[in-house]
């Protein structure tokens, strides 16, 4: 007898926003997932732009998890001092949770680029893939993804409870046209981010002064 499946959502979460959280909540409900694990990725420090630290990204992910029943934070990728491959994270989780179906959540942009991922053919040996639609990313699949879908797609949510891994489920989620990049740009301009991310995260960003640019608009020089 298998345990209830859990959802896994990896991301840079710089910052976490409703485009991450709404599809995860909808998948949690549609697939009766026992838990959603948010897995912040390690990213190498970016020197050109001041950006927030791993600790700050983690703090924001923790705040978001606190507001959402069933959401937990998995810090394993941040704990390592180098980027992790998804396949390695899935293999480690499979060892820890031998009887739990794993549902790796991703946006359509990620599915379209899947064949560029390290050992991508093996991902479905360790997890199901649950793919959310994302405005701007049409399901115009490259050949390797078409083939993967032909073999692995299911429309039956129950099927994800009956096997540990191996299915692809395309979600019918509410499309949300938001990226962290757009949110950072909005914050850099000093605009109000309310309703694009959890209020506690917006408050943290404000308190910490994150994503602001100090660049002043140059004054027009006198004629
Ligand atoms: P950035 O703009 O910094 O590249 P992002 O907003 O795309 O960031 P990531 O942290 O890179 O966010 O994304 C983590 C996961 O969440 C990916 O699988 C991505 O496809 C998914 N995702 C992000 N935004 C959305 C969205 N608006 N709708 C559906 N999925 C999304």
Image (cartoon, rainbow, N blue to C red):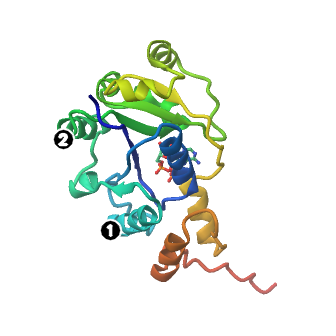
Write down the residue under mark 1: 55
Q: Regarding mark 1 in the picture, which secondary structure is present there? A: helix
- Badge 2 or badge 1: first in the primary sequence: 1
Q: Nearer the viewer, mark 2 or mark 1?
A: 2
Is the residue 178 above or below the residue 65 in the image? above
Mark 2: give few (<14), some (14-19) or many (20+) Cα within 10 Å: few
| Percent of width and height locating residue 63 | 42, 68
Looking at the picture, tell me which residue is in the foreground, 220 or 223: 220
| Percent of width and height locating residue 25 | 52, 49
| Percent of width and height locating residue 172 | 62, 35
Residue 82 in the figure: left or right of residue 179: left
Write down the residue under mark 2: 96
Residue at 49% from the left image edge and 28% from the top image edge: 157
Looking at the picture, tell me which residue is in the foreground, 177 or 3: 3
Is the residue 181 above or below the residue 138 in the image? below
Picture quarter containing residue 140?
Answer: top right
- Quarter of the picture containing the N terminus is top left
Picture quarter containing residue 194?
Answer: bottom right
| Proximity of marks 2 and 1: CB atoms separated by less than 8 Å | no
Residue at 40% from the left image edge and 54% from the top image edge: 70
Q: Is residue 5 visible?
A: yes
Q: Is residue 211 visible?
A: no
- Would the CB of label 1 be found within 8 Å of ligand 1? no
Mark 1: give few (<14), some (14-19) or many (20+) Cα within 10 Å: few
Looking at the picture, tell me which residue is in the foreground, 131 or 147: 131
| Measured Cα–Cα span from mark 2 to mark 1 | 25 Å
Residue 81 in the figure: left or right of residue 214: left
How many dots with numbers?
2
Q: Regarding mark 2 in the picture, which secondary structure is present there? A: helix
Looking at the picture, tell me which residue is in the foreground, 20 or 83: 20
- Quarter of the picture containing the C terminus is bottom right
């Amino acid at each position: 007898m298998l345990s209830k499946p859990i959802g896994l959502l990896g991301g840079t979460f710089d910052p976490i926003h409703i485009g991450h959280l709404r599809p995860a909540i909808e998948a949690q409900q549609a697939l009766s997932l026992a838990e959603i694990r948010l897995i912040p990725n390690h990213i190498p420090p970016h020197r050109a732009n001041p950006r927030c630290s791993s600790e700050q990204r983690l703090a924001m992910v923790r705040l978001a998890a606190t507001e959402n029943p069933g959401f937990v934070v998995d810090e394993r990728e941040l704990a390592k001092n180098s980027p992790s491959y998804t396949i390695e994270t899935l293999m480690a989780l499979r060892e820890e949770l031998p009887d739990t179906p794993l549902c790796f959540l991703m946006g359509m942009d990620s599915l379209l680029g899947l064949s560029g991922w390290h050992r991508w053919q093996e991902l479905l040996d360790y997890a199901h893939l649950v793919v959310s639609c994302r405005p701007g990313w049409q399901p115009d699949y490259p050949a390797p993804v078409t083939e993967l879908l032909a073999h692995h797609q299911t429309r039956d949510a129950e099927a994800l409870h009956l096997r540990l891994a191996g299915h692809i489920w395309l979600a019918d989620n509410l499309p949300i046209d938001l990226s962290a990049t757009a949110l950072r740009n909005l914050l850099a301009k000093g605009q109000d981010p309310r309703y694009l991310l959890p209020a506690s995260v917006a408050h943290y960003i404000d308190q910490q002064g994150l994503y602001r640019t100090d660049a002043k608009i140059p004054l027009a020089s006198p004629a």
